[in-house]
Amino acid sequence: MTESGESGAPVSEPIRVLIVDDHELIRRSLALALAAEPDIEVVGEASDGQEAVELADRLMPDVALMDVRMPRQDGIEATKGIKASVPSTRIIMLTVSDEEEDLFEAIKAGATGYLLKDVQINDVPAAVRGVHEGQSLINPAMAAKLISEFANMSRKEAERPPQLPVPRLTEREMEVLRLVAKGMNNREIAKQLFISENTVKNHVRNILDKLQLHSRMEAVVYAVRERMLEIT
């Protein structure tokens, strides 16, 4: 939904963000950084996972910045709860942990991005915009860890036949999926394949439609599990 500005051009509604962290100082820092952005609005703050799920259900944020380690209910469980009640909310895990298990569990729970807390605070607004536009937010090193984890799972399940016929992707769609698996964003993929960003977006959309999935990382996970991608 948009409204018109004085010039008559449509003005987009701000991205609604929920901040979840048990440290008040971190919440305040994030809120201040985001409040300075005209296209972003902080609609709520929560200090634990249980409160986050309750607030998300009421406020329906576009994006949630979610700590992993919290009292009462951790960020992984809160992510599952939010995705169950407000599936449209995109969740960025913001944490000090780069452990493979946390990364693995966060993506399984439905997180779209994973940022370490040593990220520059000025980079957070761009991260919020990125996931709101449909991009998965994960740096190449962490993407490699994630893919490695699922590749190990795939090898352990090598004897398991696919439960359903695997949807066929075009050669170009497979090229895009391989680059997504390397942690590349749309701009980087476009440059690598000498195509436009819009074309990349269309390919990603077609991939998700064919696989009946909701995020880029889910598509990578699925492709590894079904042995559509060879991980080296």
Image: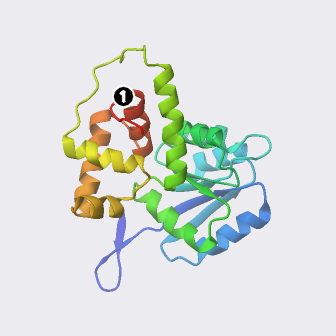
Question: Residue 10: percent from the left, percent from the top?
Answer: 31, 74
Q: Residue at x 57, y 67 (%)?
A: 124
The 10 Å Cα crowd at callout 1, few under 14, some 14 to 19, many 20 or more, is some
Colour mapping: rainbow
In the displayed structure, would residue 174 be above or below residue 192? Answer: above
Q: Residue at x 27, y 42 (%)?
A: 174
Whether residue 110 is visible here, answered yes or no, is: no
Viewer-proximal residue among 53 and 107: 107
Viewer-proximal residue among 86 and 64: 64
Disc 1 marks which residue? 227
Q: Quadrant of residue 201?
A: bottom left
In the displayed structure, would residue 125 be above or below residue 93? Answer: below
Instruction: Give the side of residue 30 with respect to residue 177, left or right.
Output: right
**Figure disc tally:** 1
Q: Residue at x 38, y 49 (%)?
A: 180
Viewer-proximal residue among 14 and 206: 206
Q: Quadrant of residue 118?
A: bottom right
Residue type, mark 1 in image: Arg
Q: Residue at x 22, y 62 (%)?
A: 194
Question: Residue 155: percent from the left, percent from the top?
Answer: 47, 24
Q: Quadrant of the C terminus?
A: top left
Q: Secondary structure at mark 1?
A: loop
Instruction: Give the side of residue 144 with respect to residue 43, left or right.
Output: left
